[in-house]
Image (cartoon, rainbow, N blue to C red):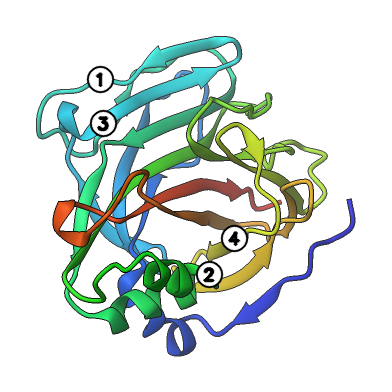
Amino acid sequence: MSLTRLYSLTCVTLLAAPMALAHEFWIEPTEFQVNSGAAIVADLRNGQLFKGSALSYFDKSNTRFEAAQGDETTPITGRMGDRPAIQLPATGRDGLVILVHEAAPAVISYSEWEKFMKFVEHKDFAQAEATHISRGWAQENFKETYSRHSKALVAVGTGAGADRAFGLTTEFVALDNPYAADFDGTLDIELLYDGAPRANAQVEVYARDAQNAVTVTITRTNDQGHAAIPVVAGTEYLLDAVVLRPVTGATTVEAGPVWETLWASMTFAVPAR
């Protein structure tokens, strides 16, 4: 696959202002690589620039929560209020573990049109303004419903194995294993939406080094919904992509949310060689 062009952006100075409305959600393991026989512990986090608050486990906040290793998939459960939200006992087997989470939908309100426009500009939804106006929706005090669709790749022992599609409404699928000994430094990914490749979609790539410095780049998927992400050893990564769509049957802002966003994220690390 030819390398997708990446557009580098300065981490905090250029991105902090537009990202004020772009709160990412991700799974953050305490360690992305654990020894054979070790437990897996991870937080659910919400924030910006790969930094955010850890959320507690609440059953009603999740519509799907599981861990997959090889052909086996196990539900992730916990006690109400657990934090970290993910505390998995040792599997006793080496291999790649994929943590999968879908959050229950929630609703936010836009009191000002300008805030919505900053969000759609940052996430590159060029037609959103025209769609909103053409449908006669009010430009203040309107609502959006949103949901989160997250994955994390964790290596147990050798970390051997492969990611796959799990049928999330939108999701990243890693086409390479970043923990493999022969990994070449470019992670090929596929972005799916309703089970189909999502072409020409914006993907934000957050990279956090060993000193916790975060840099951000933006790339796009190609016509097949694929992108090639150059990565650096000894670094943790968060991929983020958002779908914005009108709510089916929405008529007026008084009747309920008129927009829906679906957020896909994937976290992984590249071992120091």
**Which label's residue is closer to the chain start, 1 or 4?**
1
In the picture of the structure, the residue carrying the numbered disc 1 is 77
Classify mark 1: residues with Cα within 10 Å, few (<14), some (14-19) or many (20+): some
- Tag 3: amino acid: Asn
Q: CA distance from mark 3 to mark 1?
A: 10 Å
**Which label's residue is closer to the chain start, 3 or 1?**
3
Classify mark 4: residues with Cα within 10 Å, few (<14), some (14-19) or many (20+): many
Q: CA distance from mark 2 to mark 3?
A: 31 Å
**Which label's residue is closer to the chain start, 4 or 2?**
2
Q: Position of residue 117 (x, y in %)?
A: 38, 79
- Tag 4: amino acid: Val
Q: CA distance from mark 1 to mark 2?
A: 40 Å
Q: Could you tell me which secondary element the residue under label 1 belongs to? A: loop
In the picture of the structure, the residue carrying the numbered disc 4 is 203
In the picture of the structure, the residue carrying the numbered disc 2 is 127
**Which label's residue is closer to the chain start, 1 or 2?**
1
Which circle, 1 or 2, is nearer the viewer? 2
Q: Is residue 119 left or right of residue 201?
A: left
Q: Position of residue 27 (x, y in %)?
A: 39, 44
| Residue drawn at the location 39% of the way across and 80% of the way down | 118
